[in-house]
Image: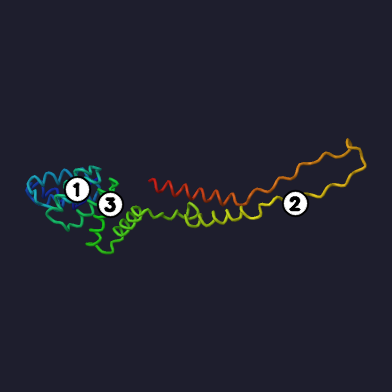
Amino acid sequence: MPEHPRIEELRRRVQSDPASIAFAQLAEEFRRAGNYEEAVATCRAGLEIHPGYLSARVTLGRSLIELKDLDAAETELSHVLQHASENLSAIRGMAEIHHKRGNLVEALTFYQSALALAKHDPDLEQAVAEISRSLSGEPAAIAEEEGLTFEEAADEFLSALSELSVDKSPPPAAPPAPVSAAPAAARAPSRPAPATSPNTSLPVLERFLDAINTYRRRKAV
């Protein structure tokens, strides 16, 4: 499959002039196309000649994140931020690195810094909200396809408990049967009392337990 015309053009430029700064553009095109290995190789080759080219280091760091080499990515992006503390791409990359590692406090700090530079960015706003909720321990709403939310399940559970507590007194005793003149042996055998209907609150309790289990599974992820 032929490469994108832009990639072919930039590749020819770099091949004809290995010292050209076009390597950074070529690497970025590789990254956007999902060819992260080529992006990394192109960046490293060009940075041997132009070590101070920060945009190429950003591309290198972001490509390394995609390749799950988080330590190397952090080294590159930290270098960028030492020289350009407000580089948005580098800040977002550092936030992603800490997020992937599970370092939520550090990730939130970088996401908030990025949001201060890119106000009203929906992806950044969502990341900040989700991490803030996780750190505060606020229970997330259970997805609609799973059934009730946590609050709704709790309400139904309390309602079910109140139903179970109503009128627990034993039923009144049945009046004594009239004495029959027939001999005892001829009397019809007594039948056991009919079983009571199952408690209608059980489905509610089961739904509550399902909601609780779903909530716990999501919190453990």
Give the mark nearest the N terminus, 1 or 3: 1
Please identify the quarter of the rendering in which residue 125 is found: bottom left
- Residue sitting nearer the eye, 158 or 100: 158
**Residue 90 placement, left or right of 202:** left
Residue at horizontal 46%, vertical 48%?
214
- Image location (x, y in percent) of residue 72: 19, 43
The disc placed on residue 105 is 3
Helix, strand, or loop for circle 1? helix
Q: CA distance from mark 1 to mark 3?
A: 21 Å
Residue at horizontal 85%, vertical 40%?
188
Give the mark nearest the N terminus, 2 or 3: 3
Residue named by callout 2: 172
Give the mark nearest the N terminus, 2 or 1: 1
Residue at the farthest top position: 185
The disc placed on residue 61 is 1
Q: How is this picture coloured?
A: rainbow
- Image location (x, y in percent) of residue 8: 17, 49
User: What amino acid type should be assigned to the residue bearing mark 1?
Assistant: Gly
Q: Residues within 10 Å of mark 2 (few under 14, many from 20)?
A: few
State how many labels appear.
3
- Image location (x, y in percent) of residue 87: 17, 57
- Residue sitting nearer the eye, 51 or 203: 203
Is residue 7 visible in the rendered structure shown here?
A: no
Of discs 2 and 3, which sits in the foreground? 2
- Residue sitting nearer the eye, 106 or 1: 106
Residue at the farthest bottom position: 120
